[in-house]
Amino acid sequence: MPTPRLDRRITHGTARNALGLALDDPHIMCADGFCLSVLAPAPADVLLLPAQTLEIGFPTRRPEPWDTWSTYLDPGSEDDDPTESVYLNVPVALVRDLIEAHGGEAPPIPHQRS
């Protein structure tokens, strides 16, 4: 199943501003409506690319299998609400499996003009 946005982040990293915030929208929407934020090392950290692990944030539903995903919870995250949590150093293969379990990446929505 193709995952072009995930593959781009793994290969090219996540561009960030001076505060470390992503310059582009880090969210990946899946075919079934599941959404998660995916951050890779910054492109300046070329020694860390292609990424082997990713930072995942605020999924719209609890990631499954939960017993595996819970081991990557940021210590400062809310244990009782997996959707309000950040997951650190998650292996790329686990992220890919999660996206594929939700039907793969949804096609991008064209930007609307107002």
Image: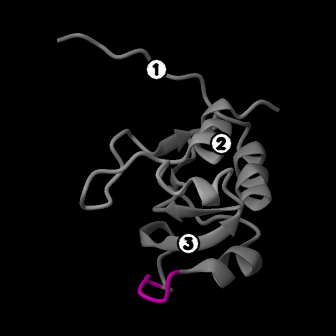
Residue at image coords 68%, 39%: 7
Q: Is residue 20 above or below residue 84?
A: above
When asked about the image quadrant of residue 65, the answer is bottom right
Q: Residues within 10 Å of mark 2 (few under 14, many from 20)?
A: some
Q: Which amino acid lies under the numbered mark 2 shown in the image of this protein?
A: Thr
Q: Residues within 10 Å of mark 3 (few under 14, many from 20)?
A: many
Mark 3: which secondary structure? Answer: strand
Q: Nearer the viewer, mark 3 or mark 1?
A: 3
- In the visual, does 79 lie left or right of 23? right
Q: Nearer the viewer, mark 1 or mark 2?
A: 2
The residue under label 3 is 87
The residue under label 2 is 11
Residue at image coords 77%, 30%: 2
Q: Residue furthest bottom?
A: 75
Q: Is residue 2 above or below residue 62?
A: above
Mark 1: which secondary structure? Answer: loop
For the residues marked 3 and 1, what is the alpha-carbon distance in whole angstroms?
Answer: 26 Å
- In the visual, does 44 lie left or right of 4? left
Q: Closer to the N terminus: mark 1 or mark 2?
A: 2
Given residues 3 and 102, the one toward you in this image is 3
The residue under label 1 is 109
Question: Start and end of the magenta stretch?
Answer: 74-78
Q: Closer to the N terminus: mark 3 or mark 2?
A: 2
Given residues 17 and 104, the one toward you in this image is 17
Q: Position of residue 29 (x, y in %)?
A: 54, 38
Q: Position of residue 17 (x, y in %)?
A: 28, 51
Residue at image coords 65%, 34%: 105
When asked about the image quadrant of residue 26, the answer is top left
Q: Which amino acid lies under the numbered mark 1 shown in the image of this protein?
A: Ile
Q: Which amino acid lies under the numbered mark 3 shown in the image of this protein?
A: Tyr
Q: Position of residue 40 (x, y in %)?
A: 55, 55
